[in-house]
Image: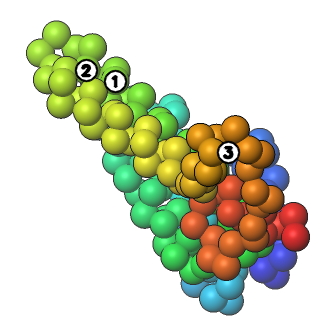
Amino acid sequence: SEATTLALLEQLQERDLPDVMLWVIERAAPECSPDTRRRLEFLKGSALVSQSRVAADTEARTGLLDEAERSIDAFLASSPTDDMAIAAFTQKGSLLVERGRICLALAQRPDADTAALSKEAAAFFDRAIKTLRTAVPTPPGGGKEPPPPAVVPEKIETAEDAVLRSLH
């Protein structure tokens, strides 16, 4: 059943077995409901991020992170409102930080275009911040007043939005 498949994938994720997760997802997805397939897309992205951490070289890591980002973005495009939304935005933020770190590592190579790679890394870090945190307008009075109470967002676009929605 779908509940059993999701429970199995959760256990595999806790045990950090991404290769087995991907195998289960590939076999289970065609038989699942659209909602479960949507969840499997996120779990696939998470498994690919885990696999990227042990990839042999930078090119393989980058390819896995590209595929993971596509899977996570596909899940987020389905406008999730459950706790998986928090995990997905957090995973995407971590993925973008990892991509920035790769750029910084490549910039350390002797023949590297340090300026271009540093700029690319900064763009990944900026996207990670935007993925994780809702933009907060500067309060009137130069920031000396307490911030307004958090507003539950209509549309979930960041990890912070997902947390606010789940708390209310």
The Cα atoms of the two marked residues, 2 and 1, are separated by 5 Å
Q: Residue 77 or 62: which is nearer the viewer?
A: 77
Judged left or right of residue 125, residue 1 is: right
Sequence-wise first label, 3 or 2: 3
The residue identified by callout 2 is 107
The residue sitting at 34% across, 21% down in the picture is: 105
Q: Residues within 10 Å of mark 3 (few under 14, many from 20)?
A: some
Residue 22 at x, y percent in the picture:
58, 59
User: Label 3 amino acid?
Assistant: Leu
Q: Residue 82 or 41: which is nearer the viewer?
A: 82
Mark 3: secondary structure: loop
Judged left or right of residue 69, residue 78 is: right
Mark 2: secondary structure: helix
Asked whether disc 2 touches disc 1, contact meaning CB atoms under 8 Å apart, the reply is yes
Specify how the rendered protein is coloured.
rainbow
Judge depth for marks 1 and 3 and give the one in front: 1
The residue identified by callout 3 is 17
Q: Residues within 10 Å of mark 2 (few under 14, many from 20)?
A: some
Mark 1: secondary structure: helix
Sequence-wise first label, 1 or 3: 3
